[in-house]
Image (cartoon, grey):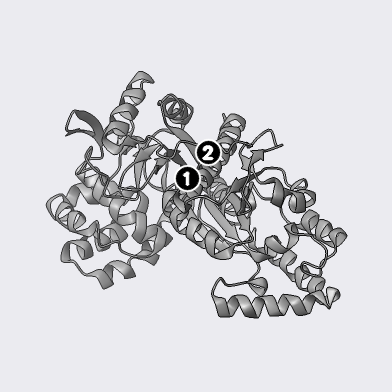
Amino acid sequence: MQETSFVPLKPQVLSFSAFLTALFQSFDEEGLRPCVLRNYEEFPASNVGSDVDFLIRRSELPRIIRALGSLPGIRIVGYAERHYVAHLFVEGVSSAPGIRALGLDFIWSLNWKGLEYLPTDAVLQAAMPWRAGDLTFLVPSPVHEAIISLLSTLLIGGWLKEKYFPKVQPTFTGSRLAVLAALSPKFGTKAATRLVDSAIAGNRQEMMSCVRPLRTSLVRRSLMHRTAHSVFAVARYHVREFAVRCTPATLETVCISGLDKCGRETILAGLIPMLRNSAKLVERRNSCSQLKIGCGSSQSDASESSWAEDRRRPLVSMARMIPCVFEEWISRFMKRDNLTLWIGESCFYDLLIDTRENRNGISRWFAKLIGNLLPSLDLWVLLDGAGGVMESEKEKVLGVESPTQLKNHTPFLKTRKYYIGLNACRPAPIVAEEVYAAIVDTLAQRAGETLRRRF
């Protein structure tokens, strides 16, 4: 059969400048005026931050999504919502060489543990126009920007971000009374004055010692003035944080498998940088450390010797699989950030999909049982070095597959929801582009389903 590529090898992406122009134009068409919180000084030429932060009213979020969805050539590949912010990841824009995606945070509440420390309406009402090239957008007033830049790490994380402090200190010095007026309603005069004066003096140790009094004062004053609302806000915060950090809801999983470990290593080396910014955290992960097989000659020889021994002891080989199932399930509920993309590679899966007799001492029925017990993956990528291609049988994800390898792996692949097989007998950059296309297509599809349910 004729070999075909999954996608064009050089996908077109918008420059950061072109993306910003289209984005703000789309916002204007929707009647939106979001406020860019920080790191806008070099717009539209470049973005000095890892993402772009906007302050909005929560009621504006559906129109924000609609505006993003209307941009040509841009796909939303990730969406995660917390109690105060919506994290979106868009593909098709380059903010730096080699990067094809960008994170956008739409914040509607400036808070700690659900308790607001600076009213959103006050920041938006005091926002000022900022001219950057041909663009004009809103930014916070200097006082509000200094407070947000300081408290977003000091109050929330308990640490000082030095990157922003050179702008915070002169603002606090020149507008001391205005800063105190903004902080006192939530923290009280005493705690606010202590923080502001230590920032003006540049006393970082004193600023760190202000963290606990600030939090205590915020909790006490919030409960005094709005008891029921504050209790509900704190409870909602913890529930939503649990959903983000301790459930698989914001975890995207891809397994890349194939018999040639060294060839897969080369492909992954080119793939991981491409996926940067397509999720909050992109991790390359080896499933089940107990079954790692290296690609070095000495490691490979040792591994072959180990599995040759296991072929003579099928029960040992089967027993080694059971802890891996538990490890896979436990890893799904470990703490993670916002939206995580796991790119997994594992001889554990390699052993399961290759069920030829006497290959690894694992019988077909046991491999099928283990496959059914494993947590499902969002995408399965099989790299085949045998040559030849055929069209995928799956409807949701289409690609090219090798009949040689599928003949051995079909029983396992049929238990997977989404999979794609790729002919790896081509240059690694070409295969990496095809794997990238399959992954972002899957991410875009899942994000679209999430957004349809949400809005």
| Badge nearest the viewer, 1 or 2 | 2
Residue at (41% x, 58% y) in the render: 156
Gap in Å between the C-alphas at discs 1 and 2?
9 Å
Whether residue 127 is visible: no
The residue furthest front is 1
The answer to which quarter of the image holds residue 204 is bottom left
Q: Residues within 10 Å of mark 2 (few under 14, many from 20)?
A: some
Front position in the image: 409 or 68: 409
| Residue for badge 1 | 433
SS class, disc 1: helix
Marking on residue 59:
none
Report the residue at 60% width, 51% height from top.
254
Viewer-proximal residue, 345 or 294? 294
Question: How many callouts does the rendering have?
Answer: 2
Relative to residue 390, is residue 34 drawn left or right? left
From the top left corner, tell me how far across and down residue 341 is, in percent. Answer: 53, 52
Query: Where is mark 2, residue-wise?
Result: 5
Question: Residue 373: image x %, image y %?
Answer: 79, 57
